[in-house]
Image: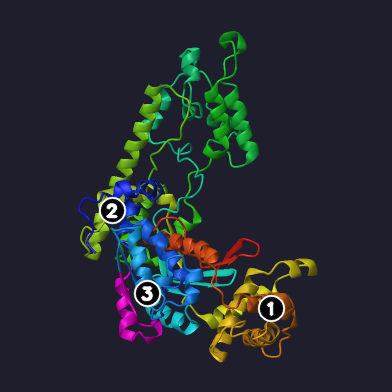
Amino acid sequence: MVTSKLFDPSNRYDRQVRLWGEDGQASIGSTSACVLGSDSLATETLKSLVLAGVQSFYIVDDARVEQVDIGQNFFLHIDDIGRPRAEATLEKLTELNPSVLGSSSCQSPTALTQEDVEKLATFSVVVAVNQTEEVDAKFAQVLYDISVPFVCIKSFGLIGTIRICIKEHTIANSHEENPRPDLRLDAPFKKLTEMIAETDLNDMTIEQLRHTPYILLHFKGTFYPQPLEEFRKQRNDEKAFPTTTSDRKEIQQILLSFRRSKEDSGTKDSENFDEAKAAVMRAFQKTTIGASVKSILTSSQCSTSTQPFWLICEALRRFVDANNGLLPLRGTLPDMTSDSSRYTRLATMFHEKALADAQEVLRFTREVEKERGVGDVISEEVCYRFCKNADRIRVQNGDLLDYSRETKEIVAKIREITVDEQTRAEKVDSATWMLLMRAAGRFKKEKGRFPGTNGVPVSIDAQDLRKRVEALIKESVKENEDIQPMLHNVTDSAIAEMCRFGAAELHVISSYVGGIASQEIIKLATNQYVPIDNTFVFDGHTQESATFKL
């Protein structure tokens, strides 16, 4: 399929660009996904990726469309019955976005040779949908070693799960909610210090005082005491800084004393003073490096890796060492009541300082690139964006997918469940559903069908499924350990519910879980936001979800 040359991604993906940024959308546009499976869960996952504007996708599945597919996959029509399901879904998916390339293979994922699996390194991400544990483990081993993200998603009746397997995932911007402003009250830079020194609150008219940006109110006036200076004077400590809530409340009271009296001003209600007071709790924080960023800068990867993320992190580490342990200035100011001239001057100096810091990091980056013989791989624009979000970088390190080890951890979680009998009967814990999914998989492997299918009564399959639950628990605990406490938390009603599902794939569950899976894939592709680490479980009975690391 040929993409139209007239296509303008900035128009089609306008709303997404507002969320991910142009660089994020560019990353999505270069993402290629391989999906093993073409059922409704796979189709819903691909639908969201196609609409988001990935570069291409590849479906691997040997199934043919059957009558049951028509009722659970809205992308299939009765006329598709008998057709290769991969081809039928490919046809519908490519209609959603003509700029996305799609292809398929009518080969079973289980039939792929080791060479075929290794070729998957060309994809940005590989997604296994409702595959067996053996298929998951086979692909996970190869992809983990070559650092290609592997996402396993499954749905069974009203239960859906997502498991992300990746050796290392770097995050250039975690998009922390409601981040603290980077005002550097405890370490003002030169130009800001000069503007503070020029500010004389005593010489201002009432209107000028009312339109003084609160960042200046936090600092020094000539006649009025500096809040921080007064705070230190009261403690007879030149380096004192408010570290507790009570300390910051003292700062707030000092700020309020700056207001002119009613006789002078006619009122004490000045919006900028209210803003200054409200901002104290968040603005008066020491400028420090968070634990997660500190662990990145002290990682051995900084000293050895030639990957772009680690190259610039080594440059960032050198910048921090040369600048009294400070990260590059973020360079943005929060909104505040002010006259245009002073706010513009403040915003400009913060922006210029951020650019200067980014230039210094870029200089260190060029040094690192030269030392490691990789050429100029970091552009000036990338360096600036990285520095702007330097306090929000993260690294996730994952373990290889190992169902045996993870089942032991699931059983351990079930052992720790402590709820009353009524709660146990009314609500099934996420770990219990995970164990029952594993038990249903073993049931299928040993009997050639899922529990609750082929017209077998639920009561009979429930007994067989419980035996497999017991076997999994015994394999996961120490020899001769009493398994009754764990079995007690896997209720008969939950086991019977798994059988009543009859391995049904409900489109509403597929749509919900597939949508979440696609969001996680986009996070992996853009290196923005923090992906699930590493397991997600959705319970359609209660409409509740849980995440935990296995």
Specify the farthest residue to the front.
79
Residue at image point 47% right, 20% down: 211
In the shown orientation, is residue 3 left or right of residue 165? Answer: left
Q: Are marks 1 and 3 in contact (CB under 8 Å)?
A: no
User: x, y (%) of residue 383?
Assistant: 30, 51
Residue type pointed to by label 1: Ala
Q: Local crowd at mark 1 within 10 Å, few (<14), some, or many (≥20)? A: many
Residue 389 at x, y = what percent?
Answer: 40, 49
Q: Disc 3 marks which amino acid?
A: Ala
Contact, mark 1 vs mark 2 (Cβ under 8 Å): no
Quarter of the image with the N terminus is bottom left
The three-letter code of the residue at mark 2 reads: Phe
Residue 335 point in image, percent of width and height: 46, 32
Q: In the displayed image of the protein, which residue is found farthest to the top?
A: 263
Residue 496, disc = 1
Tell me how far mark 1 sits from mark 2, CA to CA: 62 Å
Which label number is shown at residue 45?
none
Tag 2 residue: 364
Q: Position of residue 291 (x, y in %)?
A: 50, 56
In three-dimensional space, the C-alpha distance between marks 3 and 2, rounded to whole angstroms, equals 49 Å
Between 446 and 490, the residue placed more toward the observer is 446
Q: Visible in this render: residue 239?
A: no
- Quadrant of the snapshot with the C terminus: bottom right
Which residue was labeled with disc 3?
A: 86
- Other-residue count near label 2 (Cα within 10 Å), few / some / many at <14 / 14–19 / ≥20: many
The mark that comes first in sequence, 1 or 3, is 3
Q: Quadrant of residue 432?
A: bottom right
Q: Nearer the viewer, mark 1 or mark 2?
A: 1
Q: Which residues are magenta?
A: 103-125
Residue 115 is a magenta residue: yes
Instruction: Of the two numbered discs 3 and 2 on the same chain, state the one appearing first in sequence.
Output: 3
Please tell me which residue lies in front, 19 or 288: 19
